[in-house]
Image: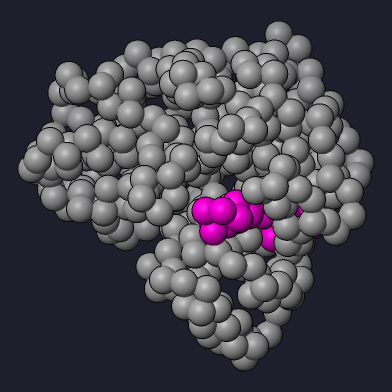
């Protein structure tokens, strides 16, 4: 194997280990782009190894689907980190030491999972069929396969059939959470919008043939809308599967590269995958329309090309990493900003003009408002609080 190929794969393995180890985990997950020469050198190494990396990913996915219990045997993570965290209660379900604290399981099954230290843990074992299903859905959605069971679960195949999961049939019919979060996007959520004019996949879930088959039965994918550059994950696999048109703002289109950034306390490696061949590259400040019901709203800040998708009839805003809810209120992920926090806050203020009642983010939790006035009241309070901070 070529020396550069071995080096690139080794660095990717180190990256996965670093992210899963809280003692090594970088405080800022996405370091800024290095000098052009360094980026070009790193890009060459990863380009030469792309086929090998793809093979590794495919093998890991096959193991993940075939053996949700236990963790994948091809993982570079030491076996000790796959052991049960002592913070879990006794019982079948548990979280191991590879958790990256992405919060997915805690909002998917809040009656089962909580945060203890800087990782998730099971604080209550499922006591009903419904709770067990939610725990299994969280297990299948975990980007790092950190949720496990003491013995093989016979219901896992039935749980796989439930994806994508309908969010709220009464208020936002036809909107689904895809599950199957990808470690390539640090566990970001993705969504499927069912519509007569053609379904829209918002951001990229982890590609699995089971999920793809489920999506195909629901009408497939006409457009794949990528809110910004760092939640693109398996976009190429989804594009090839459904021959859909991918949409991304030109400011966030990039070629593949990988780089390392050394800080005082840790080493962070960021890996990005090419979006140079997306079919539709948005230009300018918009807005842009997909039919009469969908408006794409330019919201730069988290990244230079961040765009939200506004489903007008359902009053739902798909925000990527632009805006979300956490345990205490609205959040814009200042610590993980790619471009400009002041610009992001300015873009949040523009949302006061839109009549939406739901926020469906990539990272973070959903937000549901009573009406337009309630939404604006919460947004204005959030923005007023940010005025006192210096960025």
**Whole-percent x and y of residue 71?**
33, 25
Q: Residue furthest bottom?
A: 388
Q: Is residue 75 left or right of residue 248?
A: left
Vertical order, 30 against 63 (above or below): below
Q: Nearer the viewer, residue 171 or 117?
A: 171
In this image, 92 relative to 76: left or right? left
Would you place residue 10 above or below residue 326 in this image? Answer: above
Looking at the figure, which quarter contains the C terminus?
A: bottom right
Estimate the x, y position of residue 231 in percent, counting from the top left.
62, 42
At 46% from the left and 35% from the top, the residue drawn is: 178
- Magenta stretch encompasses residue 203: no
Residue 218 as seen in the image, left or right of residue 33: left
Q: Is residue 224 visible?
A: yes
Front one among 272 and 213: 213
- In the image, taking residue 158 as reference, residue 290 lies left or right, namely right
Read off the magenta span: 302-317
Q: Position of residue 195 (x, y in %)?
A: 56, 36
Residue under the point 25% across and 40% down: 134
Q: Where does the image place residue 318, in percent across and percent down from the top left?
A: 58, 52
Q: Nearer the viewer, residue 250 or 151?
A: 250
Q: Which of the 4 quarters of the picture holds residue 201?
A: top right
Q: Residue furthest top?
A: 1
Residue at image coords 91%, 44%: 36
Q: Is residue 53 visible?
A: no
Above or below for 85 versus 360: above
**Residue 1 figure quarter:** top right
């Amino acid at each position: 194997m070529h020396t550069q190929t071995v080096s690139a794969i080794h660095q990717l393995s180190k990256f996965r280990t670093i992210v899963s180890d809280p003692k090594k985990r970088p405080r800022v997950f996405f370091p800024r782009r290095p000098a052009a020469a360094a980026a070009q050198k790193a890009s060459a190494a990863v380009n030469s190894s792309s086929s090998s990396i793809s093979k590794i990913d495919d093998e890991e996915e096959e193991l993940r689907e075939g053996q949700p219990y236990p963790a994948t045997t091809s993982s570079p993570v030491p076996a000790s980190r796959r052991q049960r965290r002592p913070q879990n209660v006794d019982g079948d379900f548990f979280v191991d030491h590879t958790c990256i604290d992405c919060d997915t399981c805690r909002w998917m099954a809040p009656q089962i999972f909580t945060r203890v230290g800087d990782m998730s843990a099971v604080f209550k074992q499922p006591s009903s069929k419904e709770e067990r299903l939610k725990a299994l859905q969280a297990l299948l959605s975990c980007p790092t396969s950190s949720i496990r069971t003491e013995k093989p679960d016979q219901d896992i195949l039935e749980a796989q059939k439930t994806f994508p999961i309908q969010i709220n049939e009464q208020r936002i019919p036809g909107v689904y959470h895809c599950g199957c979060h990808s470690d390539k996007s640090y566990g970001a959520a993705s969504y499927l919008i069912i519509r007569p004019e053609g379904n829209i996949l918002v951001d990229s879930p982890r590609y699995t043939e089971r999920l793809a088959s489920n999506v195909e039965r629901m009408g497939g994918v006409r457009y794949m809308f990528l809110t910004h550059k760092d939640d693109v994950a398996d976009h190429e696999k989804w594009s090839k599967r459904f021959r859909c048109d991918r949409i991304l703002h030109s400011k966030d289109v990039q070629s593949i590269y990988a780089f390392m950034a050394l800080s005082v306390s840790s080493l962070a490696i960021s890996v990005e995958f090419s979006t140079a061949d997306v079919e539709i590259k948005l230009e300018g400040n918009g807005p842009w329309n997909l039919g009469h019901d969908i408006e794409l709203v330019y919201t730069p800040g988290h990244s230079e090309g961040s765009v939200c998708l506004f489903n007008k009839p359902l009053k739902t805003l798909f925000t990527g990493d632009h805006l979300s809810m956490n345990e205490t209120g609205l959040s814009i992920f200042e610590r993980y900003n790619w471009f400009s926090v002041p610009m992001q806050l300015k873009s949040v203020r523009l949302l006061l003009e839109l009549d939406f009642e739901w926020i469906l983010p990539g990272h973070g939790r959903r937000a549901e408002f009573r009406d337009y006035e309630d939404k604006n009241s919460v947004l204005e309070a959030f923005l007023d609080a940010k005025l006192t901070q210096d960025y």
